[in-house]
Amino acid sequence: MEKSKYKRDWSKYDENVITRYKLMFPFYVFEHWWDLLAEENRNARTKYKAPKEFDEFLAFLHIFLPYRAIEGVLRALEQLKIIPTSLDYSTIWKRVRNMKITFPEASDELEVIADATGISTNTGGQYIVAKWGKTRDSKFLKIEIVMDNNEFNVINAEVTSNEVESAVKTVKDLQDKGKKVKKFYGDKTYDANEVYKTGVEVVVPPKKNASTKRGHLARRKAVREFRKLGYDRWREEKGYGVRWRVESLFSAVKRTFGESVRATSFAGQVVEAKLKFWAYAWMVHLANSVVGRAPGIRV
């Protein structure tokens, strides 16, 4: 069997990757520090030492560095006169922990893919696991991603124990904003009445015990169609194969920012895990808007 070949504009792709990191540095904030700060402090009860726009840079640094290390970086930036003042540990911690994590605006019409992956809370890393094996303390956070199938954008990321509830909320939020969600792709985890109640076309393989007599009408119809076609034909006709894109996203984020979090508290772990996907989403979105995408095309 002949191996698939892909053609890509590697020069453009390389520039896109370089630009992702460049644009995460807030040059505008550095330049307009005092103007931004004056506007924020105009009616503030507590005077800020740094603009709120600076928080995103702190959050980006925190993906790579602990809070004490960030404090050191800010002192160096102050000495270089890039910023007029540094921030202490407590201020950095509060700003990152309380920052509202938002993702790039979704398209007006879109297809979504939902899936979950594990983020390790074992700070020992792969060496400890390889040398000593998994310990009783080895744990994972389950983080669910809802992404745009066409634009490869992250729409939302939530640490959750109930993927269905979280995904349905994301779809409803999109609909409330006037977005048209045309399709919803997911694995068997999402074979639930709540997903079908959103009114979108659901491309989810039914569970083995799925009923054709009970549950939402659209779900019963989908189960009958799946059993009539069989998995292979159903997969081809419904385009279910696009689900590989969310796995590609998981791989890209973990290769870029690592598979584990450093925080020891659950709240801190949740923030770190979400920040990985937040940063990747904005890096890709901003670079695509400046440089343009350079996808691989099968030839």
Image (cartoon, rainbow, N blue to C red):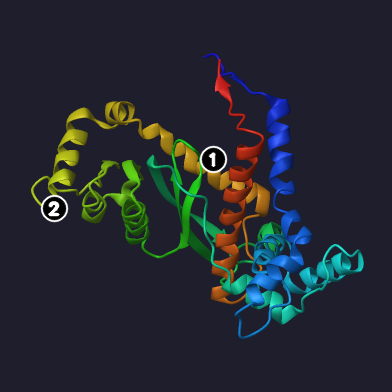
Q: Amino acid at mark 2?
A: Gly
Locate residue 35 relative to residue 271 in the image: left or right. Answer: right
Q: Nearer the viewer, residue 205 or 164?
A: 164
Give SS at disc 1: helix
- The first of marks 2 and 1 along the sequence is 2
Locate residue 86 relative to residue 108 in the image: left or right. Answer: right
- The residue where tag 1 is placed is 248
- Which residue appears farthest toward the right when viewing the image? 79
Question: Residue at 36% of width from left, 52% of height from top?
Answer: 174
- The residue where tag 2 is placed is 215
Compared to 220, does 150 lie above or below?
above
Q: Nearer the viewer, residue 38 or 116?
A: 38
Image disc number at residue 88: none
Question: Residue at 52% of width from left, 59% of height from top?
Answer: 102
Compared to 7, does 219 lie above or below?
below
Q: Are there few (<14), some (14-19), or many (20+) residues within 10 Å of tag 1?
A: few
